[in-house]
Amino acid sequence: MENLDKINQAIIQSAVTLPNQAGRDITVIKEQQAMLIAEENSVSLHNIYLASLKKDILPYRYIRNLESISITDQLKLMQAKACIVGSGGLGGQVIVLLARLGIGNLTVIDHDVFDETNLNRQALCTTDVIGKSKAETAKEVAERINPAVNVTAFHSKLDDSNASQVLDGSTVIVDALDNIADRFVLESYAKKLNTPLVHGAIAGFEGQIMTIYPGDTGMESIYGKINKNASPAKSPVSILGVPTLTPAIIASYQAFEAMKVILEKEDVFRNMLVYLDLAKGELKKLKFG
């Protein structure tokens, strides 16, 4: 980054010390000041926040993350890249959460457009985006939520022609798809790229989460051998529907798993399927291997 010394000096001069919710004094930079520095130096807000975090100066928007997420961790999140495959019921929620959390680079891929049936559950769907690209809408919403996040959108289906471009360089990949066959395809690409994959699936008031690392059995341990001829009409989601509460909760677990992968925590749901039945208030952990 050009003019780094000048930028660092401007950040230090603009920083203020404020108490956080726990009463600790924290050195922060407010977004208006950060945006002015970015504009004056012709750099992105993303780069200003990277520079400030490296100086242990916290962007003020993240002050409520402290006590749970350190400044060092916030820097790791800002440097990370998460790819969300699918931006509907699960993916839309995940994108909003990761943008607010401060994941610095988000890639979204989805070939679909919004329709009226998405209004019941998809966080990004409003009446004014009916007929619009889900991926492009995700980019617009994420950038409004957090202008320090770099968002790349692909209005297409993940396949051999674009997988390397879309997924390469990702710290973590999030499976927000709606069918088993595509999940197996995504898993194969994630393993080729040696990238952890956070799986999530929903149907009715039930959902599941699992984090799959290269070398893990992964999808096959959940679904067995894939049946490419299975009828979509017989899938659990077709039979049970998808009320709005379920994707919100499962997506929160997926976003949390993505954060744990980025921060290299040991307690990820690896070789373990976490199953939730919201109606019964049950959570079960099924271990594999």
Image: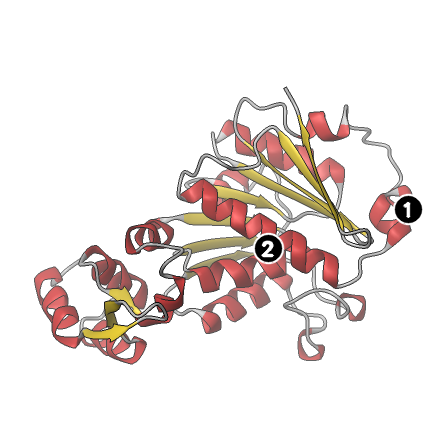
Residue 273 image-quadrant placement = top right
**Residue corresponding to mark 2:** 252
71 or 237, nearer to the observer: 71
* Picture layout, residue 189 above or below residue 118: above
Q: Which sits earlier in the primary sequence, circle 1 or circle 2?
A: 1
Residue at position x 13%, y 72% from top?
10
Residue 170 is tagged as none
In the image, 117: left or right of 91?
Answer: right
Q: Residues within 10 Å of mark 2 (few under 14, many from 20)?
A: some
Residue 266 percent coordinates (x, y):
45, 34
Judging from the image, what secondary structure is the residue with disc 2 in? helix
Q: Residues within 10 Å of mark 1 (few under 14, many from 20)?
A: few
Amino acid type at circle 1 is: Ala
Amino acid type at circle 2 is: Ser
Q: Nearer the viewer, mark 1 or mark 2?
A: 2
- Quarter of the image that includes the N terminus: bottom left
Q: Is residue 114 visible?
A: yes
In the image, 24: left or right of 155?
Answer: left
Judging from the image, what secondary structure is the residue with disc 1 in? helix
Q: Are marks 1 and 2 in contact (CB under 8 Å)?
A: no
* Picture layout, residue 26 above or below residue 268: below
242 or 140, nearer to the observer: 242
**Residue corresponding to mark 1:** 233
